[in-house]
Amino acid sequence: MTDPDLAAQAVAILRENDRGSYTVPTKGLYPFQWNWDSCLTALGQRHVDEARAWTEIETLFAHQWPDGMVPHIVFHERDDGYFPGPDVWATGRPVPTSGITQPPVAGFAVKRLWEGAADRAAAEDRARALVPKVAAWHRWFFACRDPGAEGLVAVLHPWEAGRDNAVDWDAPFEGVPTEGIAPYTRRDTQHADPAHRPTKAQYDRYLWLVERFRGLGWDNARLHDASPFKVVDPGFNAILIRSAADLAALAAALGMDAIAAENRGHAARGLAALEGLWSDAHGQYLCRDRATGGLIDSASSGGILPAFAPIPPARAAALAARVEALGGRARYLVPSQDPADPRFDPRRYWRGPVWLVVNYMIADGLMRAGQGAAAARITADSLDLIRASGFAEYYDPLDGAPLGGGRFTWTAAMVLEFLAGDAA
Ligand code: DGY
């Protein structure tokens, strides 16, 4: 496949999954709007239709909660092909949404749309309207997910981290019970190979947490302290820090000085606190379990994602070395778990497979940090995967087999970004 063919196929997938004002991640498996999917999808859409790209993010923020949270799913239409649907979440929103959030990549995405826009007047208007909403989301994070003012936020559910069944959550999941959950039927395993999806034991815990938070009326002032699962994920925090730094720069350019100062503060405090997650033994960052206080011994891609944030140059160099070491153990970078780890599972969702969105963010950060060789290898591996296996949800890092859902929106969007050369 030549690169123009790849681009044409990516554009066709974006069109096919476009529902007018939002895009579904893929037909069947994910029939609604997902938060970080949409923000990253907009980056691909901008190469085709700038106005449509802005609409993608605006639609998501039209469903922001009054407290500032931006939910992880917006259930625009009824579709019984997905579980858990709006009746399980029962959040009481006018258009139903889930009750948890997702990696806050919007600040980064909005700045990137704005800086690359051909239509400067439209970009200025649309950015000006979105900036205060993104700022409110960031404020919500530090108020509700960092009540001890540590500078880093906790995720209260693996679905918030986006890396649903990462090895990182195995130890904290030991503190999450499963007693008393309502009987349920999974739908994901009817759309995708069950061997490539989370296990029943994990789903039971996902559901227990949803029922616990629903029992608290989705009151974000109470959820953090009441949750047995609260993990400080370096990848999630790096995305928040990068978005805060980018939002600060964008707000400053638009003359929105108070928002700029507030977000510069979030980024600076977050960067200082991120140092506490560094592991010399692993040469990367690790999660911290806020329920126990300890670091979690799991070298996942979540601990390499901090490359996306403006971390110190020595840390970026160490992460580039780590990426190169992983490249010696996997044909395709970046495996979501180190293949040297006995818990590595090359085909099971976030326990080994490669995800193009993670590759994109790591490559972007490494490139900005002057680590061009590692960024170039990640970009080349990403495009090799598409040429070999098409636009899958995720891929086996050892043999490149396509896994999960097919004709996947954000994979297509990332390909357009890689081809445009923005990430590396
Ligand atoms: C799922 O249903 O698999 C999603 O990852 C939850 O957001």
Image (spheres, helix red, strand yellow):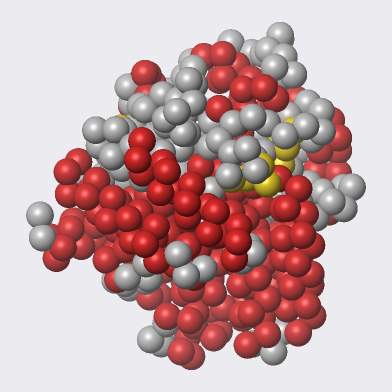
Front residue of 76/411: it is: 411
Is residue 194 in sight in this rendering? yes
Looking at the rendering, which quadrant does residue 63 occupy?
bottom right
Tell me if 377 is positioned left or right of 258 in this view: left
Name the image quarter holding the N terminus.
bottom left
**Residue drawn at x 70%, y 25% as measured from the top left:** 172
- Percent position of residue 79, x then y: 43, 34
Farthest residue, direction right: 148
Q: Indicate whether 194 appears above or below 421.
A: above
Looking at the rendering, which quadrant does residue 346 occupy?
top left
Q: Indicate whether 179 appears above or below 26.
A: above
Farthest residue, direction left: 1
> How many marks overall?
0
Q: Indicate whether 64 appears above or below 220.
A: below
- Percent position of residue 314, x then y: 60, 61
**Residue drawn at x 54%, y 86% as measured from the top left:** 124
- Percent position of residue 193, x then y: 32, 22
Tell me if 322 is positioned left or right of 306 in this view: left
Name the image quarter holding the C terminus.
bottom left
Is residue 393 in sight in this rendering? no
Looking at the rendering, which quadrant does residue 225 occupy?
top right
Tell me if 356 is positioned left or right of 73 in this view: left
**Residue drawn at x 68%, y 76% as measured from the top left:** 248
Front residue of 339/361: it is: 339
Front residue of 181/153: it is: 153
Tell me if 223 is positioned left or right of 396 in this view: right
- Percent position of residue 54, x then y: 46, 71
